[in-house]
Amino acid sequence: MRIILFTGKGGVGKTSLAAATGVRLAQLGHRTLVMSIDPAHSLADCFDFNTDLFHLETSDPLQINDKLSILELNIQREIKRHWQEISSYVSSVLRTTGISGVEAEELAILPGMEELSAMMYINQYRREHRYDAIVLDAAPTAESLRFISMPTTLDWYMKHIFPFQRNLLRAVRPIANRVAPFELPTDNYFVNIRNLFEKLEGIGEIMEDPRTTSVRLVTNPEKMVLRETQRAFVYFSLHGLTVDTVIVNRVLPAEVMDTWFDEWHRSQENVLQEIDEYFSPVPVKRIPLFAHEVLGKDRLQELAKVLYPADEDPLAVTRTDKPYTFEKRDGIYEIRVLMPFAVKGEIGLFKKGDELVVEIGTLRRHIGLPRSMAMLRPSRAKLDNGVLIVEMQEGQ
């Protein structure tokens, strides 16, 4: 099973591109599910369906045809199915502070519940071999980063905190409940957490396997949108996920000749050039601004033809190597940059804001730095079997 994750700044058009990808995959004969994990769901709207279909008391996907289904996660329904003990306890604690019942139930929807619910479905469908492909219409960038970091965070909690916390509360609960202003969680609360963790077993490895999971970053040819896309690229790399395509959506077509758009053309061309330089060698696709809103299956098919021309299969594994990785060895920060076609020679390194720019001959790479390394400066570099290793240290 392949997982294709579409993410980007809110409003860039990732839902339309995810839906069009699902339509194309179904046309090619792949059993496909398009799943929205964005709290502000618009997947049903994209297909121009009645959204009431998603408010039925079921968690089953809505079948479009024999190869294509769509699913919008309903967090209230998921709480009843997966999070009942946890949500009930949080609600009871909130009510002791004077918060009303309805408000307490709303506040008991904790960050991460929706993302973890989505991962449970992905794991379930993978075990059942129900689909050949799952296309994820992810939340805007910040929430998507939380989504991909959840397995690692939960695994650490279960190994280091959960056993201690559960045993401690088991010992002190009878006494503490007599004096505390609210009751401590029962053991059913911890059983609920354990059951959730078991349903997620193995999902971290799946998300980090480039032959299974690919990230497709969606952006617009605008400087403010590009900056968030660059940050997302850095953090997906940090978390071990492979970005196999950057999609620039809503590019103003060249045939739009009205002088009112001259400045837009110049601005977009500058940003497009910056995108090509920054994300190289990751492929960049340009999708034009359509003359109409992309709604309904016919227009999604039209978009799919532009996004995947000729016989291109969206499931093809086109990248397995990460463009760069960040490591810390013996207290020294290192950046390892994949440069398979570079030859040894003079290496140029310089900082540009929170980017490291690397030059070898005519090759240039722009590398966004995580916050832990943004204040460091390059001190040494070497080229070893097509991998450039750059050491970073604090500036003198």
Image (tube, rainbow, N blue to C red):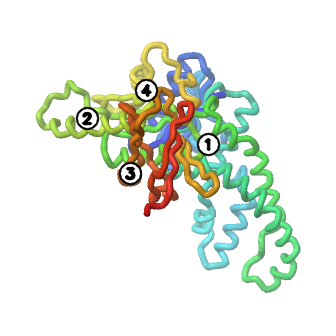
Disc nearer the start of the sequence (4/2) = 2
Disc nearer the start of the sequence (1/3) = 1
The residue at the point 20 percent across, 24 percent down is 255
Q: Give the foreground label among 4 and 2.
A: 2
Q: Is residue 157 left or right of residue 25?
A: right
Answer above or below: position of 16 versus 307: below
Q: Quadrant of residue 169?
A: bottom right
Q: Position of residue 75 (x, y in %)?
A: 61, 51
How far is the residue under mark 2 from the one under mark 1?
Answer: 46 Å
Label 4's element? helix
* Residue 50 at least partly seen: no
Label 3's element? strand
Q: Position of residue 365 (x, y in %)?
A: 41, 38
Residue toward you, 269 or 37:
269
Disc nearer the start of the sequence (2/1) = 1
Q: Is residue 388 left or right of residue 298?
A: right
Provide the residue designation for mark 2.
269
Q: Is residue 314 left or right of residue 259?
A: right
Q: Which mark is residue 351?
A: 3
Q: Single out the residue that lies furthest toward the left.
A: 259
Q: Which mark is residue 56?
A: 1
